[in-house]
Image (cartoon, helix red, strand yellow):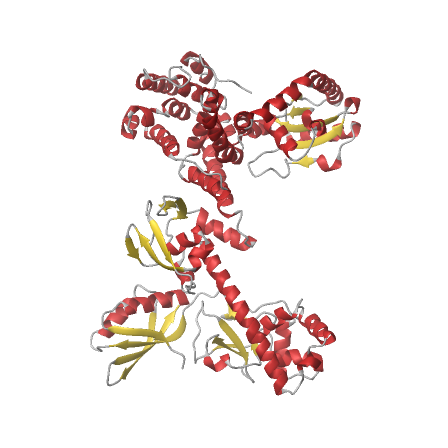
Amino acid sequence: MRKDKPNLTFDELFEKVSTYITNDDDIKMITKAYLFAYEKHFGQKRHTGEDYIIHPLNVAYILSDINADYQTICAALLHDTIEDCNVTVEELTNEFSLEIANLVNGVTKINKLNFNGDNEAILANHRKIIVGLTEDVRVIIIKLADRLHNMRTLWILSEKKQKENALETLEILVPIAHRLGMNKIKSELEDLSLRYSKPDVYFSIVEKLNQSKVERNNNVQLMKESLTSLLNSHGIKHKIKGRAKSIYSIYKKLDTGKRFSDIYDLLALRIFVDTEQDCYQVIGIIHSKYRPIPKRFKDYIAMPKENGYQSLHTTVFGENGQLYEIQIRTYEMDDIAEHGIASHWSYKEKNKTLMQSAMEEKLQFFRTIMELSKEEESDEVFINSVKEDVFKNIIYVFTPKGDVIELPFGSTPIDFAYRVHSKVGDSMVSAIVNGNIVSLDYKLQDNDIVKINTNKTQTPSREWINIAYTAQAKNKIKAYFNKIDKEENLKKGEDLLNKELKRKKISNSDFYKDENMDKILKEVHLDNLTDLYIGIGCGKYSPISIINIVNEVDVSKEEIILNKVNSNISDKTIIKNDIIVEGIDEIKVNIASCCKPIPGDRIIGYITKGNGISVHRSVCPNVSELDERLIDVKWNAIVDKKYSTSILINATDNKTVLIDIISKTSSSDVVIQSINTINTSEDYMFDITVLVPNKEKLIKFMNDLEMIEKITHVERLIK
């Protein structure tokens, strides 16, 4: 484990950075940053008794190990000046540059956060906040170096503070270092965290390692010499190093129940070669002489880890019958394995582009994982959630207790409620933001304080799906109604089937025999009677078609179409029409003129006699009582056009209200097709046919109309 440098001087740092920063102006800027920090921190002392400037010097020196650019070195030297020396961002901008000032300000923001709590959800949220506050990945890297030096001098603090800092480091910062692929810093942070959180365990492992050190070193040296001779005989240019197992990684293995003597990869070697092709050649040569353990071979070159790590891993029976873990990689792979995203600093000619693209990739991926990894969602929903929630601007709002909630810009109180908990969202009745009642479609702003009022008897509204912004909230609302619909369809399906049995004078005891149920379920490819009831309830199967499976009755032409859909004889779908009918290659489809469904409406198909399939809204009374010839249909998402539907408007005046109605269409993507005025003794009614792209736009238009002073009511018509 590396120790801090209590006597580190600027000359040592200057000598180190001069090996890779060659521009005179950049070097002068680093010198200027040091002198500025020295002056501002003059007289300040650390808990260790050292001059405070030793800390920023050490942070900069840690970053010089990974060839950090001059802006990052400057920011490291200056990183505590805003927080501890009353220096302003404007002052740093004037003295240095906006870029350096922003880096220092970013570290200051993170340092102001209080990361308390040991709940995994809270810890995950803290990690997200750090990443969310960071527009430039270099801020995180400076913070990691800052924490590393503080951990190296943690011995000066009380035992309580040591444990608090160790836990925070292990739970908050180590996962970030891992996600950025910065293994060298991550590993030292882990070992130091264990040193102070569980000192008895730490020193027990150290003692055991010291006891076996001579024997281990002899075995490693013997295997190293054997491999060197073997690879030289095949003309492979290479370099071999013994690899020390980190104390924390040993602890994790012991924690799973393994004995110290069972940790065979304590004997570990790392082989470096020039090319990827050499890696595979070396693994073949080694396996030709030393028998490998099959399940211990890993190819992270062909399939890199999420943080970019690449290497070949194998465990073999080596010299003296000992087990050796061997890693094989190129020199560049090793640089990435040790320094992760920071390794891009090493390649100066493409520094800026590589660093920026790597930053975007790592931060976006990190946000995605932290936000969505525990959601039980399909791959499609996951991808859509990433697009909708992760790759957007982020805002931070607060609960009345001061807890931070991260949301994408554009979120509403509905999104906030479901982010807090599904039960809060499902039972929400109203929202109060900064002490004022707001509508549920209010767009939350940074630093808003949000209170959600709930009621145990309240349930979600289907319209919330159109108001909610995040995929998470939309999915939870849909899940609620899917569950409700499933329960309703279950009861409805059972009632419909039993009603049809009664109409046909078939006894339930005869029909529900085991052999009949097995025959029906096999025919419709279902697992149980519950799924059959649900299928009947939602219109996927008609009761008569199910009964006919048992009775083997000849069916009509219309029922042949229905059975073809339900048994999936054809897996093609119609994409030429507005409506998709799964299981039928070609059929005429008509949108019913009685209820005029539009995209977004729940719809059902009815097989007519001689005129194809008529598509109705599920709530249309013309089909709601039908038992037979109903089939499952859905909207074709590819079709992009407007659809006709009717609304009825009640108003107290007919002179100016029509002008107001027409004016609302321009901002609502709505076209008025026809207007029919209906005069009554009490008020005025307008039967209006409009063309709209979907239900969401129609609801917005209707809501806009209800805001007109002289309009008293707006509703959709079913004729």
Give the residue drawn at x 56%, y 77%.
Answer: 630
Q: Is residue 529 above or below residue 386?
A: below
Where residue 423 sits: x, y (%)?
Answer: 45, 56
Tell me where residue 564 appears, x and y as whole percent: 64, 74
Count of residue discs: 0
Q: As drawn, is 502 to the left or to the right of 409?
A: right
Q: What residue is shown at x 53% (from left), y 71% (from top)?
A: 488
Is 541 drawn above or below residue 464 in the view shown? Answer: below
Q: Quadrant of residue 500?
A: bottom right
Q: Could you tell me if residue 656 is visible in this image?
A: yes
Question: In what quadrant of the picture does the C terminus appear?
Answer: bottom left
Q: Is residue 694 among the parts visible in the rendering?
A: no
In this view, 449 is above or below 357 = below
Q: Nearer the viewer, residue 350 or 455?
A: 455
Viewer-side residue, 111 vs 598: 111
Please indicate whether residue 350 sits to the left or right of residue 95 in the image. Answer: right
